[in-house]
Image: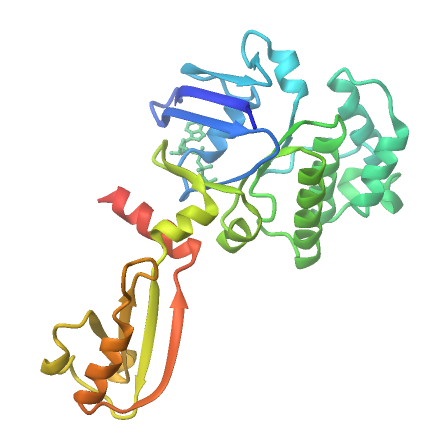
Amino acid sequence: MSAILSIRDLKKSYASGQVALKGVTLDIEEGEILALLGPNGAGKTTLIATVCGIVNPTSGSVTVGGHDIQRDYRAAREMIGLVPQEVALEPFEKVWNTVRLSRGLFGKPKNDALIERILKRLSLWDKRTARINELSGGMKRRVLIAKALSHEPRVLFLDEPTAGVDVELRKDMWDIVAELKAQGVTIILTTHYIEEAEAIADRVGVIAKGEILLVEEKASLMDRMGKKQIELQLAEPLDAVPEALAHQNLVVGGDGHSLVYTYDTRGPRTGLTQLLNDLAAAGLRLRDVQTRQSSLEDIFVDLVRENAQ
Ligand SMILES: Nc1ncnc2c1ncn2[C@@H]1O[C@H](COP(=O)(O)OP(=O)(O)OP(=O)(O)O)[C@@H](O)[C@H]1O
């Protein structure tokens, strides 16, 4: 695979003096889904807006399919679709016209059959003659998606696409993302729903304070940073870890009703057999045992916390 989007040392300071991007370098492979995670104000929207030519970079470069977004703006922009975070639509325009015009703006030839397919796919066909201001918030978001798809982009940006949308649209959204990926479209999404990134992304990028902290295959990230915990629920509560178990990596949990053991499944040994032997020798009786694998969310929270220190 080759990079369809190359971002090199991209910096952005707003006129207010706010530094939103501090030199972002990132290559995005053709056909992948990259989830960009970051706390509020990390620079996600600025990064997307800069790549889409809405915000001018202070320095650095971006190419899309080999086209520089500043020198070769039209060719670069034609390859990109953007579903923005905020609804910005002509209130009195009809749905059909809005989506159809959007394709024309990118210099693409008329293709009403395609627009019809997109509107049907997004359950907007029955609303095609409705004016935008007659639509619900969820329907408006569907129109934003239809617009972004109208010129058949090769790279699609979704900025918080499921924030505040209902369950049905969220499901539709992820189904459409899967269909686009199958067609070879590259997708970059920002989301606060980390479970969704976990479910759908090939790679995960974490951005904080205008800097990329990491970009890694989701599976290897979870493998590398993921930990496993075993929670041992006790028949009788404890105030502290008993002396006989002090050498074990245990902490008291659940108001003294459990002991929590953290281990690495990839290490040469987990220490579980020894732990169970030591527990029995210490005379502790167990009521139940549960294991827990750390999620992408745990990893993300740890990373951002470390960076804040
Ligand atoms: N037009 C602007 N003028 C001045 N500062 C801005 C502007 N847009 C964003 N910023 C600032 O730049 C920083 C990055 O903001 P940005 O919106 O890119 O972050 P984000 O990661 O998308 O955040 P969120 O998750 O809250 O949407 C923030 O400190 C923000 O206040």
150 shown above or below 235: above
User: Where does the N terminus fall, quadrant-wise?
Assistant: top right
Camera-nearest residue between 66 and 12: 66
Q: Residue at x 49, y 21 (%)?
A: 6
In the orientation shown, which residue stands out farthest toward the front?
Answer: 268
| Quarter holding ligand 1 | top left
30 shown above or below 280: above
User: Where does the C terminus fall, quadrant-wise?
Assistant: top left
Q: Residue at x 15, y 79 (%)?
A: 245
In the orientation shown, which residue stands out farthest toward the left?
Answer: 243
Q: Is residue 83 visible?
A: no
Q: Residue at x 66, y 56 (%)?
A: 166
Q: Position of residue 55 (x, y in %)?
A: 51, 21
Q: Residue at x 82, y 40 (%)?
A: 119
What colouring style does the render use? rainbow
Q: Is residue 164 left or right of residue 180?
A: left
Q: Position of residue 87 (x, y in %)?
A: 64, 38
Camera-nearest residue between 178 and 95: 178
Camera-nearest residue between 1 and 309: 1
Q: Is residue 96 visible?
A: yes
Q: Position of residue 140 (x, y in %)?
A: 72, 42
In the orientation shown, which residue stands out farthest toward the top?
Answer: 71
Camera-nearest residue between 3 and 97: 3
Instruction: Determine which quarter of the picture holds residue 76.
Output: top right
Q: Position of residue 184 (x, y in %)?
A: 68, 33
212 shown above or below 10: below
**Labels in figure, total:** 0
